[in-house]
Image: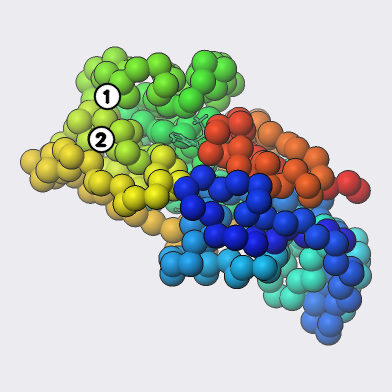
């Protein structure tokens, strides 16, 4: 099997030479473990943070070692009776064709509810991030006007649909191309959307939400956060989910220069990590599984093929080459 290793810590934007794809023997599971032949690998922006040697909420990747990340696949050899061969599982030992996984770290998935890839998107970590970020962290309520940046990506596209389903008055999204703006309006049901490359974020947001916003779900940071602080109404709530506009910068990003608005407007800005909500995943699965089965929520997938495409797919997250969830499909 082949696997992707991190061989150099990126400075600024990662490049292909920071990675290596190597062949290794297919491992044999020890007692209590399973061997999974992966069908889909996930590449995610948070992995950029793990490539630097600084302690964060996720451990840094070791140099010369395989990277890890979300993956789904079928158990092909089992030394764990609870997960026999043929079981489809999701796990966090990705970036490789075959993963040896402790049974306790593999979760059985139900591919009659949704295809396996959905467990890396709608029904997986991005879905949980959108759900808990919107409803808990930002405490979105029916009647709120909600603004979401990075809206054509995995988390943002789901957050926007969840807001609509919970009775938002108006859902506004921003993304980086005209095609993505059309996707937000026509496929995901956003009430308004704009291309942040088209001009000032602040002016475009003001035009889309002349009466202001109540909730901002921040995936981007930078100018977007600044614009949201200007547009948000008193007692507004901001979920700080991510700040991808700064992930590849080599100098610390300054905070928004209008942060003081948070004082007079009595804002609540709250950061979060999806794993904080692990004990509430069953609630998430029940609700979002129902929306999915009723056809009320969906998410495009941008799929590339083969483990050699994992690095370009990852790099593409920073160029916006994905619409919806970015996935790597491996040969069956
Ligand atoms: P996405 O599917 O949204 O992919 C990343 C997207 O970011 C790209 O498609 C691109 O879209 C956009 N982007 C890239 N560079 C910039 C930039 N400079 N300015 C504006 N947009 C940019 O990824 P995810 O849905 O997986 O993640 C979305 C966010 O959520 C990230 O910030 C991530 O770190 C965060 N996150 C946080 C978690 C948590 O627990 N707090 C968990 C999971 C994700 P475009 O074409 O529109 O530019």
Relative depth, front residue between 86 and 113: 86
Q: Residue at x 86, y 73 (%)?
A: 27
Residue 68 position, x and y percent, is: 66, 62
Is 310 on the left-hand or right-hand side of 153? right
Is residue 53 in view? yes
Residue 63 position, x and y percent, is: 62, 68
Q: Residue 131: which numbered mark, if any? A: none
Q: How is the image coloured?
A: rainbow
C-alpha gap between disc 2 and disc 1: 8 Å
Query: Disc 1 on helix, strand or loop?
Result: helix
Q: Quadrant of the N terminus?
A: bottom right
**Rendered position, 287 above or below 38:** above
Q: Are marks 2 and 1 in contact (CB under 8 Å)?
A: yes
Q: Residue at x 80, y 40 (%)?
A: 305
Bin the neighbour count of mark 1 within 10 Å (Cα to Cα): few under 14, some 14-19, many 20 and up: some
The residue at label 2 has a CB less than 8 Å from ligand 1: no
**Rendered position, 174 above or below 86:** above
The residue at label 1 has a CB less than 8 Å from ligand 1: no
Is residue 118 in view? no
Q: Residue at x 30, y 43 (%)?
A: 238
Q: Which of the 4 image quarters holds residue 5?
A: bottom right
Q: Earlier in the sequence, mark 2 or mark 1?
A: 1
Residue 29 position, x and y percent, is: 85, 77
Q: Which of the 4 image quarters holds residue 313?
A: top right
- The residue that disc 1 covers is 202
In the rendered image, the residue lying farthest to the bottom is: 31
- The residue that disc 2 covers is 226
Q: Residue at x 53, y 67 (%)?
A: 60
Bin the neighbour count of mark 2 within 10 Å (Cα to Cα): few under 14, some 14-19, many 20 and up: some
Residue 176 position, x and y percent, is: 48, 25
Relative depth, front residue between 145 and 7: 7
Query: Disc 2 on helix, strand or loop?
Result: helix
């Amino acid at each position: 099997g082949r696997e992707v290793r991190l061989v150099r810590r990126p400075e600024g934007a990662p490049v292909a030479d920071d990675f290596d794809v190597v062949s290794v023997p297919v491992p044999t599971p020890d007692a209590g473990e399973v061997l999974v032949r992966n069908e889909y690998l996930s590449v995610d922006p948070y992995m950029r943070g793990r490539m630097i040697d600084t302690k964060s909420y996720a451990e840094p990747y070791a140099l010369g070692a395989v990277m890890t990340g979300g993956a789904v696949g079928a158990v092909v050899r089992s030394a764990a009776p609870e997960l026999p061969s043929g079981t489809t599982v999701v796990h966090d030992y990705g970036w490789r064709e075959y993963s040896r996984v402790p049974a306790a770290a593999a979760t059985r998935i139900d591919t009659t509810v949704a295809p396996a890839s959905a467990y890396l998107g709608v029904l997986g970590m991005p879905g949980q991030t959108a759900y808990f970020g919107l409803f808990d962290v930002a405490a979105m309520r029916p009647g709120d006007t909600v603004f979401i940046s990075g809206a054509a990506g995995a988390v943002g596209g789901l957050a926007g649909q969840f807001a609509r389903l919970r009775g938002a008055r108006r859902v506004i999204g921003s993304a980086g191309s005209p095609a993505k703006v059309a996707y937000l309006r026509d496929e995901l049901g956003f009430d308004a959307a704009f291309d942040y490359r088209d001009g000032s974020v602040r002016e475009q947001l003001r035009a889309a939400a002349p009466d202001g916003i109540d909730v901002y779900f921040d995936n981007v940071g930078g100018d977007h956060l600044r614009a949201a602080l200007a547009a948000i109404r008193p007692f507004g709530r901001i979920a700080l989910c991510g700040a991808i506009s700064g992930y590849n910068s080599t100098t610390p990003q300054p905070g928004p220069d209008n942060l003081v608005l948070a004082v007079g407007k009595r804002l609540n800005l709250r950061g979060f990590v999806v794993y904080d909500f692990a004990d509430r995943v069953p609630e998430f699965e029940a609700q979002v599984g129902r929306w999915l089965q009723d056809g009320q929520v969906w998410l495009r997938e941008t799929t590339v093929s083969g483990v050699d495409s994992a690095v370009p797919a990852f790099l593409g997250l920073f160029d916006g080459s994905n619409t919806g969830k970015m996935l790597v499909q491996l040969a069956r």
